[in-house]
Image (cartoon, rainbow, N blue to C red):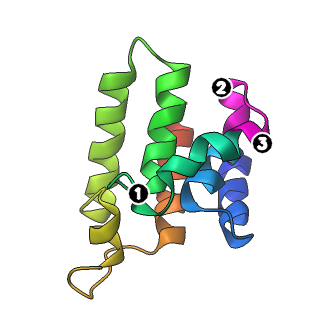
Amino acid sequence: MTEKVEKAIDNHKNFYSCSAALLCAFADEIGLSEQEARTAAAPFAGGRMGKCGAVLAAEYIISKKYPDRAEQMCSEFEDSFKNMNRSVICRELKGALTGAPLRSCRGCVTDAAELLDKLL
């Protein structure tokens, strides 16, 4: 496990939202301070945009770092995440409708961080 993946997990353990945990761990990749990353991550947290916040944060980083290839890379990222967890939708991952979670929030942060680390 790389330092950035460990940092994302530690961030989440320290009560960062799923999106902030990931975005703060990888902020240097796109030239953001931790505070800027936390601010940028806020709209993604808690499934507010439908998708898992960790997925959205990873896609934000990909889009900023590789704007010319972002669409393809984000699609590949989502496909990989879905292969691991069967969904990228927060409420499905949490089992909100079924009572049967597919993956914990910490697990989603871990998976998204590992996939993003490989892509970068």
Q: Earlier in the sequence, mark 3 or mark 1?
A: 3
- Would residue 44 be visible to someone looking at this image? yes
Q: Amino acid at mark 1?
A: Arg
Q: Residue furthest left?
A: 98
How dense is the environment of label 3, judged by Cα within 10 Å: few (below 14), some, or many (20 and up)? some
Q: Position of residue 112 (x, y in %)?
A: 48, 52
* Mark 2 residue type: Ile
Residue 97, by quadrant, is bottom left
Distance from disc 3 to disc 2, alpha carbons, whole Å, reads 11 Å
Q: Which stretch did the figure color magenta? A: 25-36
User: What residue do we see at 75% from left, 70% from top?
Assistant: 14
What amino acid is at disc 3? Answer: Glu
**How many circles with numbers are drawn on the protein?**
3
Q: Position of residue 1 (x, y in %)?
A: 64, 55
Q: Residue at x 29, y 79 (%)?
A: 95
Percent across and percent down for residue 52 are 40, 57
Decide: few, some or many residues near mark 2? Use Cα within 10 Å; few <14, some 14-19, many ≥20. some
Mark nearer the N terminus (1 vs 2):
2
Q: Which of these two is toward me, 82 or 24?
A: 24
Q: Which residue is mark 2?
A: 30
Is residue 114 visible in the rendered image? The answer is no
Q: Is residue 70 magenta?
A: no
Q: Residue furthest bottom?
A: 99
Dominant secondary structure of the residues highlighted in magenta in the image: helix
Q: Which residue is mark 3?
A: 34
Report whether 82 appears left or right of 14: left
**With respect to residue 26, does 15 lie above or below?**
below
The residue singled out by tag 1 in the image is 48
Q: Quadrant of residue 12?
A: bottom right
Residue closer to the observer: 52 or 77: 52
User: What residue lies at 27% left-to-right and 54% top-to-bottom?
Assistant: 82
